[in-house]
Image (cartoon, grey):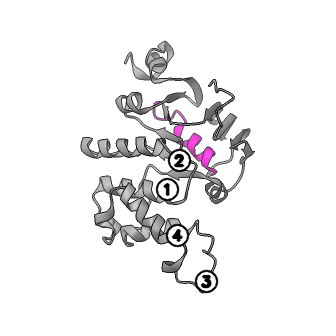
Amino acid sequence: MTVHTSEMLVLEARAITKHFGALTAVNGVSLCVSHGITSIIGPNGAGKTTFFNLLAGFLVPDKGRILYRGKEITGLAPYEISQMGVGRSFQITSIFPNLSVYENIRVACQSRSKSRYNFFMSCEKLPGVEFASRQILSQMGLDHWADSPAKNLPYGLQRCLDIGISLATEPQVLLLDEPTSGMSAEDTAVILKLIAEIAKLIPVILIEHNIDMVLNISDRIAVLYQGLLLAEGTPEEIQGNQEVQEAYLGGY
């Protein structure tokens, strides 16, 4: 990817490789992210989720380096990478089903409070946590559900809550793994609008199978194929790339 020197690289993978026995899941992939929405696409088994897990610290690359704002994060634990500013949501919704919607957000906000280790202070009195939690609830469109158990939310709103939990950790870049998976067209439209709004504030890296959606929402697209970076560019460049069409899009 060509990056202008005036752009601040937020997250950078440099020739990272990951083996699982004889299988090479990610093979020398390099990618730079500075702004907007970068989508990662490819057929099943292309290495997309493995690549995400490497970026977020859930896996350690066998070769290569990962940098966040120019600082080496290769091999750091997921919680360390999260605290530095790399947020992550998962393919499977990760919420506390029996807590209220508000409490789900509050717990995540609380994890970033400077007073979180003050065991003599009520969690309700932690400075700024109440305000930040209510702000995220409003941003996610969940105000009216604040006191409801999270398990009672419709599926689409559970995905909104999941993204809200990620945002509550104050990320400077957000990794979203198939955020519209299993959604209706109506719910997908809501999530797309939400992602577009988030991307105005921080870079978003997205794994998605919906090609129409990817072409419409992305600033850059990276195509993985059998663990390799097959192509990377604008939606127009990817749509017109013959290799991508043959390997993945089937002449799309």
Q: Residue drawn 55% across and 29% down?
A: 226
What SS does tag 4 mark? loop
Which of disc 4 and disc 2 is earlier in sequence?
4
Q: Residues within 10 Å of mark 3 (few under 14, many from 20)?
A: few
What SS does tag 3 mark? loop
What SS does tag 1 mark? helix
Q: CA distance from mark 2 to mark 4?
A: 22 Å
Q: CA distance from mark 2 to mark 1?
A: 8 Å
Question: For the magenta stretch, what is the residue range?
Answer: 42-57
Residue corresponding to mark 1: 166
Q: Are marks 2 and 1 in contact (CB under 8 Å)?
A: yes
Q: Position of residue 168 (x, y in %)?
A: 50, 60
Residue corresponding to mark 3: 119
Q: Residue drawn 74% across and 45% down?
A: 71
Q: Residue drawn 60% across and 49% down?
A: 56
Seen from the viewer's position, the closer of residues 16 and 194 is 194
Q: CA distance from mark 1 to mark 3?
A: 24 Å
